[in-house]
Image (spheres, rainbow, N blue to C red):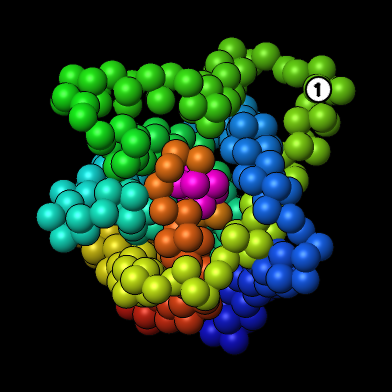
Amino acid sequence: MLSDLIFVLNGVVPIFIVVFIGYFLKRKGFLTDEFVRVADKLVFKLLLPCFLFTKVADMDKDSFYAQDVTVVLFALAAVLAVSFGTLLICTPLIRDSAKRGAFVQGVYRSNTAILGVPFAENLFGADGARVAAILLAFVVPLYNVIAVIILSVCDPKKNEGQSVGQKAKAVARDIVKNPLILSIAIGLVVCFSGAELPKIADKTIAYLAGASTPLALIAIGANFSFSDMKGRAGLAVTASVLKTVCVPACVIFAANLCGFHGAHLGALFIVFGTPAAVSSYIMAKNMHNDGVLTASIVVATTLLASVTLTGWIFLLRTLGWI
């Protein structure tokens, strides 16, 4: 139990530190508004696409077992149910479309890409890391496709005087043009074709991919303002509780009923129980949704997850499910 707590803290505390560094440097005038604006665009258009490309292109397509296929299908179905179910429920409750898009993304989208595989390996060994990596290869692309759809639908600029057909065309155009979706598509081609990138290209992409998360966290901190939280705190707290408590509870118990246990159930827990994805902030801000609310949800879920992850692990081990 103590080792699990230490591991969780080792995973989430550095996130807070880098966010605080961004906040501190901005308040001291070291970072300018122009730098933060350019950093957001750089992460969205170059660094994050490189990160997603490496995750998908490096997937081991030959390591699947029969239950791996079923757990992937379960995870994809759960992501669809949580994302569009949340959108359906909160549409009449959250009138501000920009806030609605940020809220939904904060509830369904997890920081699996950063915390998932090492967390699974720490808890379940090599088999857990393998299952988590397989889930990651399929769930992360779906996260991004759904995010483009929901953020486009909730984009206030697209909701002004457009018919349903026009909105559908705009969403389809956003999906096709989105750099994250394009990078995932290219990564899938590389993965399933068996092609190997030249060493120089591979290292260059890896360097750029490694810069995506720290720069995104610095931008979150630089953009964060307590005064901007007015009218958003309630939504941020609600989304955080849903993300770290309610969603994993529903998914875990449904997975257990479907017969998943051990490393497979543990990997599902990690996919749905980790904090909101750092990249959700970049996407929300660049697609005209509420970036401040998204940043608040990322910070709040990361803080709350330091407690809930350990609690969930203790409960699932007590029940003998993992």
The C terminus appears in which quarter of the rendering? bottom left
* Relative side of 231 to 37, left or right: left
Give the farthest residue toward the bottom: 2
Q: Position of residue 310 (x, y in %)?
A: 49, 79
Q: Nearer the viewer, residue 133 or 210?
A: 210
* Relative side of 41 to 185, left or right: right
Tally of marks:
1
Taking the spot 75% from the left edge, 18% from the top edge, the residue there is 197
Taking the spot 57% from the left edge, 19% from the top edge, the residue there is 186
Callout 1 crowding tier (Cα within 10 Å): few <14, some 14–19, many ≥20: few
Find disc 1 in the rendering and name its residue: 201
Write down the region rendered in magenta: 279-285
Q: Nearer the viewer, residue 80 or 319?
A: 80
User: Does any portion of residue 260 appear in the rendered image?
Assistant: no
Q: Position of residue 265 (x, y in %)?
A: 38, 58
- The question of residue 283 being in magenta is answered with yes
- The question of residue 246 being in magenta is answered with no
* Relative side of 231 to 281, left or right: left
